[in-house]
Structure formats: C-alpha cells, structure tokens
Amino acid sequence: MIYRLRDNERGATAVLVAVVMVLLLGFAALVVDWGLGTTERRAAQNAADAAALGGAVEFTTTSATDAVAAAVTEVYAKIAANDIVISAGDWAACTDPDALARRTLTDLGVAGGSDCISFSEAYTEIRVRIPTIDVPAVFGVFVGSNGLEVSAFAQAQVRPSFGGAFAFPSGAFSAAGGTEICLKTGTGSTNVESCDNPSTGDFGTFNAYFYSGPNECTSGGQPGPRSRIIALGMDHQLGLHPSGAGGGLVNGASCPQFGGPAKPNMVDSSGGYSNTDITDGIVKGGTWGGAFKGRLNGGTVATGTYGSATIFGKGIDNRALWTYIDTSVASPNCVAAAGHPAQPATPALYATAWADMLTCLKTTNSVIFLPSIADSPRLSVVPKYWELAKLANNSCCYHVELLVPMWIEGIYMKDSVNCTGNLRVAGGVCVHEPGMVGTTTVVPQGQQKLDSLGAVIIGCTQLVEPVCTKLTGGGGTPTFGVVELTK
C-alpha cells in the first residue's frame, strides 16, 4: 500500500512539473515579446523625435510657398530613415486627439498630409504622431498573445535666436548699412531727423497680425496686440518673395476666421501706429496675451557704464551703438566712431558721435560689431521690401525681399513732456538717444506718450556670424536658428 501511494505521488509531481514548465515558458515568451515591443517602441520614439526636428528645420529653411509641404515630406523621410515603415493609407487615416491647431490634411489640405502631422496656430511648433504599429508576437502566440501595439509622438518648436523675436512691425526700402528709417504715428507726429519723414502713406508700418493669442489673427487698430508686437515682435515667421511681382502669401489674408498662410511673404500697409502702441510697446508694456514689458524696459537693460535713462518712470536700455564696435577688426572710420564716450556730455557731442557712427555703417562692408550686440533689445529685424516707395494707407501689398537687422536709436516725445539731464529738447520735442542720461515725465500724469522712433539698418556683413544668419537667414531664407524638442 505504501509503495503504491509513492508511485501515485511520482505521477502527480510529473504533472505539476509539466504545468509549471508551461507557465514558465509562457511567461518567458511574454517577456521576450514584451522586450521586442519595447525595442520597437524605442525605435518609434527615436523616429518621431527625428521627424519633428527635421520637419521644423525644413519648414524654416524652405521657400514660403512650399514650407509646409516640405516639412511633411521631411517627416516621412526621417521616419523611413529610422526603419519605421508606415503606408500612405495609414498616414491618411491616422488621427491624433492631441493634434495642434493646423492639421496638415484636414485643415491645411496638404497633398499627402496627415492629421497626425500638425502645426501650432503661428506655425512655430510641429507635432508628429506615428500611426499605431502592430508588433506581431513571436512566442506569445502559443499562450494566446497576438502581439503589441506601438505608437509615439514628438513636438518641436522654432524660436528666434539670442532671445530675440520675429520681425518688428516696420519695413525698409534698402538693406544698406546706415540707412535710417522712422516709425511715425501720423501726419502730426514729430519728424525724425535724417528719415524720409513721409507726410502721406503708411509711415513705415505694416499690419503684423497675431496668428495666436486671446483673439486669433488680431491686429488692426487694437492697441493691445500692436503694443505686444512692438515689444516682442511678430508671433510667426515671414517668408521671402522670389521676384517682387505677382501674387504670394499675404500676411493675415484669411483673418479673422483663420490665422493665414504659413510664412507669408507679402504684407499690407498700415496707416501708422498710435501713440499708445509705441509707448506701451517700447517702454510701458501691457497685458494683452499675458503680461509683457516694453521692448527697451525688458530683458537686458544696459545702464551702469552707459548711464541711466528713465522714460515715464521706466528705466530703459541706454547703451549707444558705437560701444559695440569691435576695434580689433573694424575699419578706421569705425574705430574713430568707437572713440566717442559711452555717455556724451551734451546733445551736440552725441550728434557728432552719431554722424561718425553713420559714416562707419555706410563705408564698411565687413564685420563691425562685437557678438554681444545680439543681446541688445534695440536690435531687431525688419522686412526689406522689393518696392521702392511707400504704399497708400491700408493697401496691399509689400513684397518681402529680405529680412535685415535694424537698431532702434532715437525716441521722440512731445506734448507736455518734461526733460531733465542732458536729453535733447528742440521745438517742444524731447528726444532720448542711447548714451544720453536723464529722465522724462509728463504733466498731467497719465498722458505719457511717445511720438516717433528713429532707427538704422545694419548690414548683414557688419555682424559677426552667426548673429546675422540666426536673425535673418544671412540674406536668404530665414532660419531663426533655434529648433528644439518640447515634448
């Protein structure tokens, strides 16, 4: 009897071992398949990252009319280069619940596009979601597992370099260094010396528009958006027009229903900005679209060695342009300009220094400035138009030939403005020029208004690389320098 029981136990043990072996083998099969799925998931994520970055770069470096389509093509190429095979049908059928505002198929109608490739409202961010990939089970089929589903997504953004901004809402008719331009508020505003001082036309401005924000595609006569554009620049890129003739992509063409085309290369003229636009944008700041500081009151405000200047209670950047001259490489004319003091003692001495600075800019085609000029809030970029003269108010359109660097110089104020220090006063107008020490106040309070701005074009060859390329694309297609993953 005892021997029989032992024989029976031996049989039970064999069964138990067999069952355990099946479970262990099944678990091992699932582990192997899970590992394969993880490898595929990692490969898909690498492909999504590369595709988002590649699409963003391609968008910024491709001509205006082809930018979105080129980005889509590059997305597909990067994914294929990472050995991820997705059919055209799968891309067309793909959906992304977290897609950005501009889906390339449904919203933009790009041939071969996909709702899993999308852009933000201002085309500054691209999102790529790889359609679901079925990873077949290798061993798991023996325990009822058919495989795993894998997907991945990534987002990349394009932003200006050096903490800068997209284009300032004014334009130029020459790309030559030393060309002076002015931004005026209308026929009654102060004439800016050495500018063309138009009495009619758009006064050097264009309708910039916002493609994103609390009121999508807003510009027109609303001071909030315009002030923000002056302070921070446009929220989207401008493209370049190949010829200066014929049609193109008009900035804000579909407003207010839609933000408009990506990288528009034509802009409509504006009737001039208001005193509030310029005052808030340059000095006081505002709250439209979120709190922002004035252009010359935010970021790096150079004072100290350069003296202190206060406009309407706001300290502003006060570093003169000639203090950025690199005397080790600059021409003799520029070395002479660099010899002027950082704080001219009188308006007459400033006028002499500025005249020498203009001579430097107009006679030099090589590098003039130190790389640190890129950190100045006075440095921006404006479109250089194919047109040679100003258009009538609110007419279409200027064709954008290039983007060129611009330096904001004089700030003109009138109407009950009190000046102190060595700021220049002429004909009831108070003028602040960088390097001049003093303050401006008004009576009564609450009437603070800037009237006009003076600026000068800096030639691309006058900036050390990569400053100009990052700001403007080096005179070619704008690149704006910084492309980075955000998700």
Image (spheres, rainbow, N blue to C red):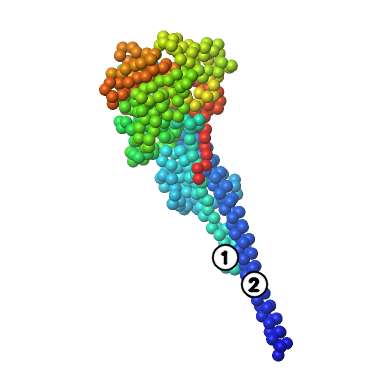
Front-lying residue, 110 or 10: 10
Q: Position of residue 361 (x, y in %)?
A: 49, 15
Disc 2 secondary structure class: helix
> Which corner quadrant holds the N terminus?
bottom right
Q: Within the image, what quadrant is residue 258 found in? A: top left
- Determine which quarter of the picture holds residue 49: top right
Residue indicated by mark 2: 20
Q: Is residue 13 in view? A: yes
For the residue pair 224 and 477, the one nearer the viewer reads as 224
Q: What residue type is labelled 1?
A: Ser
Across and down, in percent, residue 157 comes to: 49, 39
At label 1, counting other C-alpha atoms closer than 10 Å, the crowd grade (few under 14, some 14-19, many 20 or more) is: some
First in residue order: circle 2 vs circle 1: 2
The answer to whether 382 is drawn above or below residue 22 in the figure is: above
Q: Mark 1 points at which residue?
A: 145
Circle 2: residue type: Val
Where is residue 82? Give x, y as percent: 59, 47
